[in-house]
Image (tube, rainbow, N blue to C red):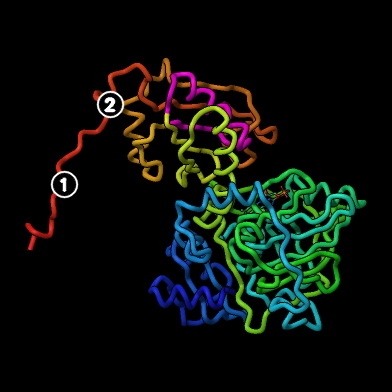
Amino acid sequence: MNLEEFALKLEEKSRLKRVKKPISKKLQCSAIMHELDGNAVFFEEIKESDFRVFGNPFSSKELIGEYLGLSPEKLVSTMINALENPTEPLLAEKAQCQEVVEEKVDLDKLPILQYTQIDGGNYITSGVFIARDQEYGLNMAFHRCMQLDKTHFSVRVLERHTMEFMKRNGGELDVAVCVGCPPNVLLAAATSPTLGESELNIANSIEPFEVVKAKTVDVLVPSMAEFVLEGTLSMNSLEKEGPFLDLTGTFDFVREQPVLTVKKITHRKNAIWHALLPGGKEHRILMGMPREPTIFREASKEAKVLDVNITPGGCSWLHAVIKIDKKSNEEPKKVIEAAFKGHSSLKHAFVVDKDINILDPNDIEWAMSTRFQADKDLYTYPGKKGSSLDPSAKQPEKLTCKAGFDLTIPASADKKKFERVKYPKIELKKFLE
Ligand SMILES: Cc1cc2nc3c(=O)[nH]c(=O)nc-3n(C[C@H](O)[C@H](O)[C@H](O)COP(=O)(O)O)c2cc1C
């Protein structure tokens, strides 16, 4: 299913908002996306471009589940399975992402949005970079791109695999930037497997898909992408990138970053541009969801873990709630420490019992108010490496105080004192006519 078909599917279920009036890529699309955050919104006519824009298409677990044909509760186990059993995608001869090969590169023709007044420029936010290293093979990762002119971007590249590949290749790396990818590709691109494990294979295990050879660079790209921008990323020429609104909703500052020179653009006929709202729900879900399975895996070494939720209130990055079937008082602390191993940027970990709804912040707070004593159940870990995204951490060293909260009932306690009393069930309809 491409983005066009997904939009139609959502429309049939009355889950798509359509904006038919002409709208500007500068600040207008983003304002509407922000108002409708959590809902898919389709912009039929962009004033500055012939292409249409799809905003927030995967901005809830329900929307991702809708595309993949999975209930939201099944997503963590699907991700765990994909991380443990990656499989290679099929190689296709022809693909929709290459239906049109543009004669000339002109980035001004694309609906690259400006999201907020303070942004350093127009930004690609949903771009998945695919690059190859002779030894390690293919790597896939998100990197936001700030448009500099008709053929160049400055690109935010953290010290991860894309940067490593660039350094190993003399500072210059051929890349394909894919926009309008299906959610299996997006979720896989946000995982951080060890060097040499291709995220393309993780995506294929979430849902099988086809790849095709890019036209001018030696990488494979998802056939179903809407656009592919091929070119060279270079750390030998740096340009200013930022400021830009980041995951926490606060501003990321200006840095000197590698420059991407775009040499070829291919796309589907009538292609749709995927706009991802920085700091919005889609950004948060794609960041957080791939860490739930890694926390689950580590914590399961210490206790019977039933579920993990990286909460939106914690920017879908800094807070995790782990539901366990507790057997001993030693387990919560071990689970907290395992969670920090499973997601190194995690700042606060909350461990709850199996009767707590970890998708409901009120229920988690209820557990804290009725089962937690700060002098016994709080574990603090000062001076640890946390997240570059936390404005309260000591930056750029990322130094923070991590903390774990044991919100579980003490193993030896009289459980009845802590458990919610249940009201009788009744068939309301019979009484409210
Ligand atoms: C929506 C989204 C945007 C992201 N933007 C960036 C970015 O601009 N720069 C960056 O280096 N990482 C960014 N990331 C994080 C990387 O994609 C992530 O760290 C990835 O796991 C790194 O891949 P690697 O382990 O293959 O290096 C973003 C992640 C998401 C989900």
Q: Is residue 342 magenta?
A: yes
Instruction: Tell me which amino acid carries mark 1.
Output: Lys
Task: Tell me: 263 left or right of 193.
Answer: right
**Mark closer to the observer (2, 1):** 1
* Quarter of the image that includes the C terminus: bottom left
Front residue of 35/71: it is 71
Q: As displayed, is residue 162 above or below residue 96?
A: above
Q: As displayed, is residue 349 above or below residue 91?
A: above
Q: Which residue is mark 1?
A: 425
Secondary structure beneath disc 1? loop
Check disc 2: other Cα within 10 Å, few if <14, some if 14-19, many if 20+.
some
Where residue 44 sits in the image (x, y, percent)?
A: 52, 81
Q: Which residue is mark 2?
A: 418
Q: As displayed, is residue 357 above or below residue 126?
A: above
Front residue of 19/345: it is 345
Instruction: Tell me which amino acid carries mark 2.
Output: Phe
Secondary structure beneath disc 2? loop
Q: Is residue 103 visible in this depiction of the protein?
A: yes
Where residue 421 sits in the image (x, y, percent)?
A: 20, 33
Q: Residue furthest right?
A: 170
Q: Is residue 123 visible in this depiction of the protein?
A: no
Check disc 1: other Cα within 10 Å, few if <14, some if 14-19, many if 20+.
few
Front residue of 278/403: it is 403
Q: Is residue 216 magenta?
A: no
Residue segment shown in magenta: 326-351
Of the two numbered discs 2 and 1 on the same chain, state the one appearing first in sequence.
2
Q: Disc 2 beta carbon < 8 A from ligand 1?
A: no
* Quarter of the image that includes the N terminus: bottom right
Q: Disc 1 beta carbon < 8 A from ligand 1?
A: no
